[in-house]
């Protein structure tokens, strides 16, 4: 029975971490109209990375947990107390540990508590449902990833000469070793998967180099590794819609940061062609069921960002860093 209590306590720990991650994701989404004006896409991406690392690894604290600079944080406003015992370390909406049948308390935003009766049978059933759905989701992700990879590799490998036409320094570093890019007909979108690029065969020859450069920049920015890490959150926190919303905007900011990096490498004429390419490809299918893949999507938002793109000045970078630091401090303490 003690073993069951440990597993249920682990489940409660991940439920609490998921709720904390959901609160911070919701805050970043609510503040997004202001945030996108001040904080650069790359800086926003790093904000998301910190959130996801902290939400999964409960021993990692935000900087604000050690430096109480702001008079109030989001957790002060929500009035959610930290766990005093158990596996979870941080604001606890749910009981931090299960110690047998009895009455436990759920903490609501605002600090009010609601009593709830828990039994071994109820908690065991909840644990089995949670594990079954998580396992099914992980299996579907892996199966769809393998299917999409087979579809891409059924195409024609790009010649090295054409890959080098992407023309960036990152491309030269990435192209060391085995084939890194294929073209295949019938792909839902051009995408990166496990460090490999798969391009739609229907792409016009003149625009293929631009798309290839963008996909190589995803690899150079380590976006494929980061996205694989994010998939762990989707599996562990599958029940929380705010986590899926945060994942959605994390991927968007990674796309925008990749676009910004690509724009820095292009000439003015190539930038105009890049915007036209995005306009045509932006309606590509979002690969929700293959979260390990990066596909072309969010065309309207990305084209708008490109139209408004300007080279970053040191003042703009510094302003973004200051705003990101303040937002990080407001997000508060441990999760």
Image: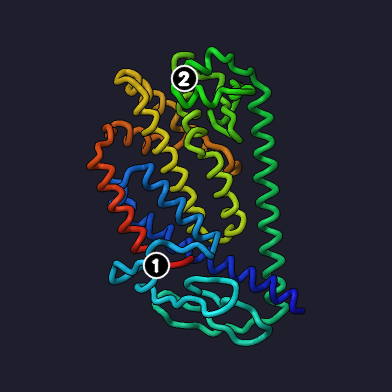
Point out the tag, 1 or 2, that comes first from the N-terminus. Answer: 1
Which residue is pictured at 67% across the width and 73% down the height?
Answer: 8
Q: Quadrant of residue 64?
A: bottom left
Which residue is pictured at 42% across the width and 62% down the height?
Answer: 62
Q: Quadrant of residue 41?
A: top left
* Quarter of the N terminus within the rendering: bottom right
Separation of marks 1 and 2 at Cα, in angstroms: 45 Å
Q: Are marks 1 and 2 in contact (CB under 8 Å)?
A: no
Neighbours of disc 2 within 10 Å: few (<14), some (14-19), many (20+): many
Image: 54 above or below 164: below
Mark 1 vs mark 2: give the one in front.
1
Q: Which mark is residue 166?
A: 2
Which residue is pictured at 50% across the width and 22% down the height?
Answer: 172
Which one is in front, 258 or 59? 59
Q: Which mark is residue 233?
A: none
Mark 2 element type: loop
The residue at which mark 1 appears reads as 66
Image: 148 above or below 50: above
Which residue is pictured at 56% across the width and 31% down the height?
Answer: 188
């Amino acid at each position: 029975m003690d073993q069951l209590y440990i597993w249920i306590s682990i489940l409660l720990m991940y439920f609490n971490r998921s709720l904390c991650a959901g609160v911070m994701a919701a805050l970043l989404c609510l503040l997004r109209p202001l945030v996108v004006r001040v904080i650069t896409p790359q800086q926003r991406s790093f904000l998301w990375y910190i959130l996801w690392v902290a939400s999964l690894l409960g021993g990692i604290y935000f900087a604000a947990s050690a430096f109480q600079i702001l008079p109030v944080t989001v957790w002060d406003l929500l009035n959610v107390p930290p766990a005093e015992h158990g596996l979870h370390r941080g604001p606890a909406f749910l009981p931090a540990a299960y110690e047998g049948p009895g009455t436990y308390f759920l903490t609501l935003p605002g600090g009010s508590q609601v009593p709830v009766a828990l039994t071994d049978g109820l908690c065991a059933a909840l644990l089995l449902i949670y594990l079954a759905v998580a396992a099914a989701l992980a299996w579907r992700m892996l199966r769809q990833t393998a299917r999409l990879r087979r579809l891409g590799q059924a195409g024609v490998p790009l010649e090295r000469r054409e890959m080098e036409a992407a023309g960036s320094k990152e491309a030269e570093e990435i192209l060391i070793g085995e084939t890194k890019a294929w073209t295949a007909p019938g792909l839902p979108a051009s995408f990166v998967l496990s460090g490999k690029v798969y391009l739609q065969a229907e792409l016009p020859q003149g625009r293929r180099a631009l798309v290839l450069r963008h996909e190589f920049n995803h690899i150079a920015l380590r976006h494929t590794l980061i996205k694989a890490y994010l998939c762990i959150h989707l599996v562990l926190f599958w029940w929380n819609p705010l986590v899926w919303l945060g994942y959605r905007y994390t991927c968007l900011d990674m796309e925008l940061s990749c676009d910004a990096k690509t724009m820095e490498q292009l000439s003015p004429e190539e930038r105009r062609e890049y915007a036209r390419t995005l306009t045509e490809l932006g309606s590509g299918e979002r690969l929700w069921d293959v979260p390990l893949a990066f596909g072309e999507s969010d065309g309207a938002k990305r084209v708008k960002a490109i139209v408004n793109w300007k080279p970053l000045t040191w003042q703009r970078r510094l302003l973004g860093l200051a705003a990101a630091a303040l937002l990080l401090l407001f997000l508060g303490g441990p999760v």
